[in-house]
Image (cartoon, rainbow, N blue to C red):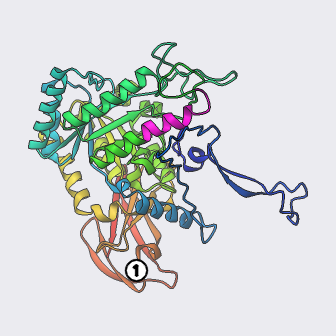
Amino acid sequence: MAFASMSADDANAHLVKWLPDPDYSTQVNYLRQTPSLLKVSPEYGPDQTISPGEEFTSFRTFVLPHDSYDRERKGLAMRRMYKTLAPWTTENPLMMHARFADWERVKTAIDQAAEVGFEMVILTFGSGFNIEDDSEEYLAEMKRYADYAKSMGVEIGGYSLLASRSIDASIDVVMPEGMRPTFGNSPCIESEWGQAYFRKLYNFYEKSGFTLLEHDGSYPGDVCASEDHPGHKGLNDSRWNQYRTISNFYKWSRSKGIYLNIPDYYFMTGGSKIAMGYREVNWSLPRNEQLVHARQNIYDGTWEKTSTMGWMFVPLTEYHGGGEAATIEPLNEHLAHYEMMMASNLGAGVQACYRGPRLFDTEETKNMVKGMVDWYKEHRQVLEGDIIHLKRATGNDLDYWLNVNPSGEEKGMLMVYNPTNHEITKKIKVPLYYAGLTDQTKVTTKSGESTNLRLNRDFSVEIEVTVPGNGDSWVLFQ
């Protein structure tokens, strides 16, 4: 029962609390306030009425003991836990966010996705897609979209905003005095409107053939003191009932193979991906600055999330301002930057929202995009492995990380990026312990050169790399 954050600790803070233990009289803290007593309990409710013969099921809490204080090792344990308990988080389709939802431009997006190897088209926010239109005509049209996408080997999905909007006073959450909704406004899921909204979602995915939902403004845990909504009695059961409604829908979606992009911590109820961790207005910065902060976001976001659990962003068209200096269109005029954006994301096994009306505009652009996708799919197993954090991007020197997959033939791939305008040559100590290598390794560089190296006693090797200005390089370990 986690919500209202994209951080595990924060999302769980509504139920999981460390408190002082009054029976711990020998603690060093003079005031005996050491947080050593774990309490797991909802702040409100559940306040449920259970009729004879009915069952009540509570939330579940998973406790993960760590074996050290090392940040990487603790993060690896968390990532392993999610891959084990929520394996849908390892699904990682290449996604295009189609800027417009009319048939001709969606068909173009599907055709282009199929040509270059993208695996999913999402009818993005502001595209004109309306999942709340439950007319038979609209559902039939969306079924046509899905059938065509399937015929091209591409999946299709769409966007819907739930909270962070107001419907009207009779529908919106009624907050206790001194409290306000998390997003400023929010409808109550257990109002008449909320119940109808979820009926429309179930109906849409049962009839349309769509296989993704990007659910923005997901339920953030707002309570509701209204006593007029049909789905809850009052304040005390309002959070429990609303969370149950949305989590049941997510679990149903997962059972139907529907992929869930949710910018909130719903991994344990079917969510596959949240934002890696960025502020949207940063995508209005100049292009070269976007590259640096993209790799910073990936580096920072993968300490506790796997690369497949977080999405990034690529503004093919203008997004939150910035004008020509911030966008990639026309694509062929900014081809090198487009390629580096793909290299920065795919080189970490991270999928981005490539948001625009098209993925390519010339044959040269198409060849670049397809080449990057082909390279990614060739090395997908290791690129979607765990990231070992080595050197965070600063914008004035090389930055790099190591992708590892000890169970694969390709055990590790070192990705190195050069944000400067000049070539840089540097020796890098690469730790291969988490790659599962112990004695020796076959090393292959981006240029195709291969050699065999013996590992040092600390399971590392030293590699010299030369990276062109505003370019990247990689080294494969087998």
Residue reaching furthest to the front: 52
Residue 349 in sight in this render: no
Numbered range of the magenta stretch: 234-247
Nearest the camera: 236 or 223? 236
* Residue under the point 23% across and 58% down: 377
* Residue under the point 17% across and 34% down: 109
Would residue 241 be counted in the magenta stretch?
Answer: yes
Element type at marker 1? loop
Q: Residues within 10 Å of mark 1 (few under 14, many from 20)?
A: some
Q: Main secondary structure of the magenta part?
A: helix
Please state the horizontal and vertical placement of residue 202, each as a whole percent of the image.
Answer: 30, 34
Write down the residue under mark 1.
437
Please state the horizontal and vertical placement of residue 252, each as a whole percent of the image.
Answer: 33, 44
Nearest the camera: 8 or 202? 202
Residue 160 in sight in this render: yes
What type is the residue that disc 1 sits on? Leu
